[in-house]
Amino acid sequence: MEKKIADGLRLKIGDEIVVNVLAAISGHDRQFAQRRLAEPRHHFVLVFSPNAFRGAPHTHIATLTENQPDPASDARIIKSVAEAFPTVTSVRVREALETIGNVVTNLVLAIRGASAVTLISAVLVLGGALAAGHRHRVYDAVILKTLGATRAGCSAPTRWNT
């Protein structure tokens, strides 16, 4: 803890403080935390060793799912939980889940579109290859007919005669 903060809170070495841990701050969250520290509130960042919270009761999580959700009832529930349990942190995830659902839906549509384009181009390439092969066979047949060739060995009733 910085000396300036400790002096402002009238703390000295050996004093005990109670810390309510709400979230761990990772590298990309530090800028956000520093901005929050500049605001006139009683928040500050403490850095603990990795084993400081070993055995801490961090596994008690509850989930509330509503049958017919709306923002007004969300606000009412969050307010009543905060009044009854001031140390409980409520986190709304509806918007995040809706965003994820929209992204997944858009990805599925993009994949279907790409698949359709791939199938259509495959059909066009196959048709072009068949048409080119047929044109080449007709060209060969005309040249051979012009040179006097017959369809020897063909059991079909139609033969090329010169």
Image (spheres, rainbow, N blue to C red):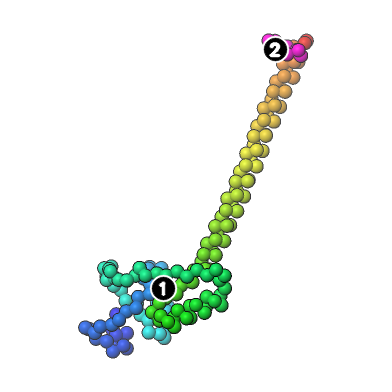
Q: Which mark is residue 151?
A: none
For the C terminus, the quadrant is top right
Residue type highlighted by circle 2: Cys
Q: Residue at x 70, y 26 (%)?
A: 134
For label 1, the residue is 31
Say which label, 1 or 2, has the lower sequence index: 1
Q: Which of the pair 162/67 is nearer the observer?
A: 67
> At which x and y percent is residue 18?
30, 81
CA neighbours of label 1 inside 10 A, class few (<14), some (14 to 19), many (20+): few
> At which x and y percent is residue 144?
72, 16
Q: Which residues are magenta?
A: 149-160
Mark 1, mark 2: which one is toward the viewer?
2
Whether residue 25 is visible, yes or no, is no
Quarter residue 159 falls in: top right
Whether residues under marks 1 and 2 lie with C-beta atoms below 8 angstroms apart, the answer is no
Describe the element under mark 1 as helix, strand or loop: helix
Q: Main secondary structure of the magenta part?
A: loop
Q: Residue at x 34, y 70 (%)?
A: 58
CA neighbours of label 2 inside 10 A, class few (<14), some (14 to 19), many (20+): few
Quarter residue 105 falls in: bottom right
Residue 156 falls inside the magenta stretch: yes
